[in-house]
C-alpha cells in the first residue's frame, strides 16, 4: 500500500501527538498550494459552469492517478465491503462538493469561500470526536475555535459583508465546507486500508462516473474554442496541483497526525489567499490582519502538542466508528 499507512484493518495504529519536522514541512506545503485554490476557481468558473468544471477537475485527477498507480502496479483491488463507502464519498466529494464550491464562488466571492472553509477545523474536530477517532478535549476544541476566530477576524475586517444578494452563494459555500469536512473524516478508514492515492482514485472515479448524467447537457452548451487560457490554467491547477498533489498530502498527513491538527494548521491557507490578493491590489495588511494571524498561530500551536493516541480497527468493527483510546 501507499500513502504512509497508519495501521491495518486488524491491528492498531499509534498516532503521535508530537509533530516531526517532515510533517510540519508537508503542512506548510499544503497551506501554500491550497492558498491559490480560490483564485484558481475564480479564474476557471468564468468559462466552466460549476458542475461541469468540478466534474472535469476530478475526471482529469482520476485519470492521472489511475495511470500512475497502474504503471507502479500499486492499485489494490477494492473490497466488496467498501463499495458503498467509496460511492458515497465520491458523490460527496465530486458532484455535491464541487457544485457547492464552484457555484458558491460564482454567486458570492473568494472571500466568502475563505470564510466558510475557515470553519473546517471546527467541523472536523466535532466530527472526529463524535465518531470516536479522537478523544474529546478542551485543547482540541479551543485550538479549532482560536484558529477559526483568527481567520474570521481577518476576513471580516477585509470588507466581508453578508448581503442578501450573496445569500444563495453563502448557503452553497456552507454546504461545501460541510461536505469537505465529512470527506476528510470518513475517508480515513479507506486511507488506512488502501493508501491515500488509491483512496483518492477510487473516490474520484466513483464520483465522476456518478456525475456524468448531470453534466451531459452543460458539456454541449459550452463554447470550448472560446475558453480563455486563464480558465484552462485554473482548471489545470485545481485538477493536478490541488486534486492530486494537495489531496494526497492531506490524506498522508491525516494518517500520520491527529486530523484536527492537520485541518487547523492548513487553515492558514485562507488568510494567505488574502495576502496574494493584497499583493495583486497593492494593499498592505493592517493591524487586524496581524491580530487574526496571532489567533490563528495560537490555535495551530495548540494542535502541535497532543497526547499519543491509539486508533484500534478490527475486522468486525463498523468502519464508520473508530474508537480512540489513550495509550
Image: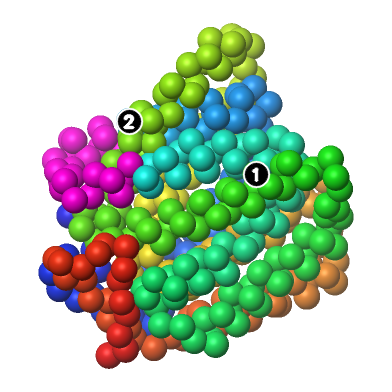
Q: Earlier in the sequence, mark 2 or mark 1?
A: 2
Q: Point out which mark residue 324 bears.
A: none
Q: Which residue is mark 2?
A: 63
Q: Is residue 231 above or below residue 21?
A: above
Q: Position of residue 271 (x, y in %)?
A: 69, 60
| Crowd band around label 1 with a 10 angstrom C-alpha radius: few (<14), some (14–19), many (20+) | many
- The answer to which of 169 and 153 lies nearer the viewer is 169
Q: Indicate yes or no whether the magenta region holds residue 213.
A: no
* Quarter of the C terminus within the rendering: bottom left
Q: Position of residue 287 (x, y in %)?
A: 85, 71
| Crowd band around label 2 with a 10 angstrom C-alpha radius: few (<14), some (14–19), many (20+) | some
For the point 71% across and 72% down, which residue is it? 149
Q: Dot 1 lies on which element?
A: helix
Q: Position of residue 169 (x, y in %)?
A: 72, 42
For the point 15% across and 67% down, which residue is it? 316
Q: Indicate yes or no whether the magenta region holds residue 75.
A: yes
Q: Dot 2 lies on which element?
A: helix
Query: Mark 2 to mark 1: distance in Å?
Result: 27 Å
Part of the protein shown in magenta: 65-87
Q: Is residue 193 left or right of residue 46?
A: left
* Quarter of the N terminus within the rendering: bottom left
Q: Point out which mark residue 172 bears.
A: 1
| Principal secondary structure, stretch drawn in magenta | helix
**Residue 110 appears in view:** no
Image label count:
2
Q: Position of residue 280 (x, y in %)?
A: 77, 45
For the point 83% across and 52% down, which residue is it? 162
For the point 55% across and 51% down, which residue is it? 34
Quarter of the rendering containing residue 58: top left
Q: Is residue 82 above or below residue 56?
A: below
Quarter of the rendering containing residue 253: bottom left
Amino acid at each position: 500500500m501507499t500513502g504512509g499507512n497508519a495501521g491495518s484493518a486488524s491491528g492498531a495504529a499509534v498516532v503521535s501527538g508530537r509533530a516531526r519536522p517532515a510533517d510540519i514541512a508537508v503542512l506548510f506545503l499544503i497551506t501554500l498550494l491550497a492558498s491559490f485554490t480560490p483564485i484558481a476557481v475564480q479564474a476557471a468558473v468564468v468559462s466552466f459552469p460549476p458542475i461541469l468544471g468540478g466534474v472535469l477537475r476530478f475526471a482529469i485527477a482520476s485519470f492521472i492517478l489511475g495511470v500512475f498507480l497502474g504503471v507502479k502496479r500499486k492499485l489494490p483491488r477494492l473490497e466488496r465491503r467498501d463499495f458503498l463507502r467509496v460511492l458515497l464519498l465520491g458523490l460527496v466529494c465530486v458532484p455535491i462538493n464541487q457544485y457547492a464550491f464552484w457555484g458558491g464562488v460564482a454567486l458570492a466571492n473568494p472571500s466568502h469561500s475563505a470564510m466558510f472553509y475557515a470553519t473546517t477545523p471546527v467541523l472536523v474536530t466535532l466530527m472526529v470526536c463524535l465518531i470516536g477517532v479522537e478523544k474529546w478535549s478542551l485543547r482540541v476544541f479551543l485550538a479549532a475555535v482560536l484558529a477559526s476566530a483568527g481567520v474570521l477576524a481577518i476576513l471580516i475586517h477585509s470588507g466581508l459583508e453578508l448581503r442578501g444578494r450573496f445569500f444563495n452563494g453563502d448557503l452553497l459555500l456552507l454546504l461545501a465546507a460541510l461536505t469537505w469536512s465529512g470527506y476528510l473524516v470518513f475517508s480515513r478508514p479507506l486511507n488506512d486500508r488502501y493508501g491515500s492515492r488509491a483512496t483518492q482514485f477510487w473516490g474520484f472515479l466513483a464520483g465522476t462516473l456518478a456525475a456524468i448524467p448531470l453534466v451531459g447537457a452543460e458539456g454541449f452548451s459550452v463554447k470550448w474554442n472560446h475558453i480563455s487560457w486563464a480558465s484552462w490554467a485554473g482548471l489545470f491547477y485545481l485538477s493536478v496541483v490541488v486534486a492530486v498533489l494537495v489531496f494526497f498530502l492531506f490524506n498522508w498527513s491525516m494518517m500520520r497526525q491527529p486530523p484536527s491538527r492537520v485541518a487547523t494548521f492548513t487553515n492558514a491557507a485562507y488568510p494567505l489567499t488574502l495576502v496574494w490578493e493584497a499583493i495583486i491590489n497593492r494593499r498592505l495588511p493592517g493591524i487586524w490582519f496581524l491580530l487574526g494571524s496571532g489567533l490563528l498561530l495560537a490555535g495551530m500551536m495548540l494542535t502541535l502538542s497532543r497526547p499519543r493516541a491509539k486508533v484500534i480497527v478490527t475486522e468486525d468493527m463498523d468502519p464508520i466508528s473508530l474508537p480512540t483510546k489513550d495509550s
